[in-house]
Image (tube, helix red, strand yellow):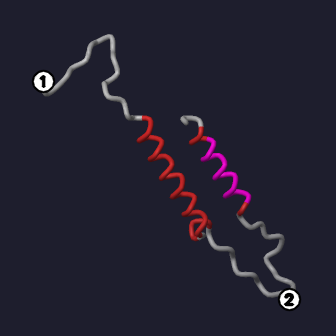
Amino acid sequence: MKNRLPRALALLSALAFCATPLLASSLDGQGKKKEPPKPIYKKWWFWTGVGVVAVGGTAAIYASGGGRSPPGTDLGNIVFGK
C-alpha cells in the first residue's frame, strides 16, 4: 500500500501534463485571435484529481497508523498516565 501513493501521484501529474491543450497557432482559421485557454487550476478535472489524491493520502495514513503500542527503542519507553 505504501508504493501506490507515489504511483498515483505520478499518474495524475502525467495525465495533467498530457491533457493541457497545445496550441499550434494563436489565430483561428478566420484570422481572429483565439481566446487564451483556461488555467489548469480552473478546470474541474484538476480539482477532482486533487480531491482524489487528498482522500487517498488521508486513507493511506489512517490505514497505516493503527498500531496499539508505541514502537520500541534502545532507550526505553516512557508511559504516561499509569
**40 above or below 75?**
below
Disc assigned to residue 59: none
Quarter of the image where one finds residue 21: bottom right
Q: Is 8 part of what is drawn in magenta?
A: yes
Quadrant of the image containing the N terminus: top right
Q: Of the residues shown, which amino acid type is indicated by label 2? A: Gln
The CA distance from mark 1 to mark 2 is 81 Å
Q: Is residue 75 above or below residue 82?
A: above
- Circle number at residue 30: 2
* Residue 3 located left or right of residue 68: right
Where on the picture, by quarter, is residue 36?
A: bottom right
Q: Could you say whether the residue bearing mark 1 is in a helix, strand or loop?
A: loop
**Main SS, magenta residues:** helix
At x 65%, y 52%, the residue is 13
Residue beneath disc 1: 82
x and y, in percent, of residue 49 in the image: 57, 58
- Observer-nearest residue: 27 or 16? 16
The residue drawn where x is 71% and y is 64% is 20
Side (left or right) of 17 relative to 61: right
The quadrant of the rendering that contains the C terminus is top left
User: Disc 1 marks which amino acid?
Assistant: Lys
Category of crowding for the residue at label 2, using alpha-carbon neighbours closer than 10 angstroms: few (below 14), some (14–19), many (at least 20) = few
In the shown orientation, is residue 34 left or right of residue 51? right
